[in-house]
Image (cartoon, rainbow, N blue to C red):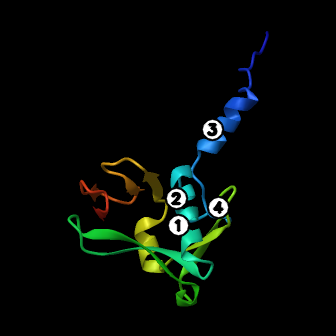
Amino acid sequence: MSTETAPAPAPSAARETASAAPHTAKDGKGILVTEPAMKQLAALMQQQGEAKVLRVGVRSGGCSGMSYTMDFVDAGDIRPDDEEYVYEPSGAPSFKVVSDPKSLLYIYGMQLDFSSALIGGGFNFTNPNASQTCGCGSSFAV
């Protein structure tokens, strides 16, 4: 009786898969950020200066009931109950993303992507918690 095992994937294939995976914060938690979004955020953070952090959250409104928010805020504006995540893009300084606990209920596990397309370009949100999204991609319902 012989037992055969499937051949192991080639090392280059394993590297390609790993580099295409979305980034998480340094602690492995937070919002998933794709490579294009990571590069764009790193560039924007460098323009903002070291005293800024990216605040990501949700608010009431939008065509589906809730909409995403993203804004650069002073590091001194971080509230005691905010969750803080540190992202470390390759070849760029690390940056911090903060979110309030209420928003995290709606966006935990969300993926942030970036497209440079002329039509429909910009940051795109893919939220596994959303039961409905609108055509613009910046509003959702749960």
Residue type for callout 3: Thr
* Image coordinates for residue 105, horizontal then vertical, percent: 43, 71
**Which marked residue is nearer to the observer: mark 3 or mark 1?**
1
- Real-space CA distance between mark 3 and mark 4, rounded to the nearest whole angstrom: 17 Å
Which image quadrant: the C terminus?
bottom left
Residue 141 visible to the viewer: no
Which image quadrant: the N terminus?
top right
Q: Which mark is residue 127?
A: none
Asked if the residues shown at circle 3 and circle 4 are in contact, with their CB atoms under 8 angstroms apart, the answer is: no
Secondary structure of residue under mark 3: helix
Q: Earlier in the sequence, mark 3 or mark 1?
A: 3
Residue type for callout 2: Gln
Residue type for callout 4: Gly
Secondary structure of residue under mark 2: helix
Identify the residue position indicated by label 1 in the image: 44
| Residue for point 31% across, 50% down | 120
* Image coordinates for residue 62, horizontal then vertical, percent: 23, 69
Identify the residue position indicated by label 3 in the image: 17
Identify the residue position indicated by label 4 in the image: 28
Q: Is residue 61 left or right of residue 91?
A: left
- Real-space CA distance between mark 3 and mark 2, rounded to the nearest whole angstrom: 21 Å
| Residue for point 75% across, 15% down | 4
| Residue for point 36% across, 52% down | 121
**Which marked residue is nearer to the observer: mark 1 or mark 4?**
1
Q: Residues within 10 Å of mark 4 (few under 14, many from 20)?
A: few
Q: Is residue 59 above or below residue 64?
A: below
- Real-space CA distance between mark 3 and mark 1, rounded to the nearest whole angstrom: 27 Å
Secondary structure of residue under mark 1: helix
Asked if the residues shown at circle 1 and circle 4 are in contact, with their CB atoms under 8 angstroms apart, the answer is: no
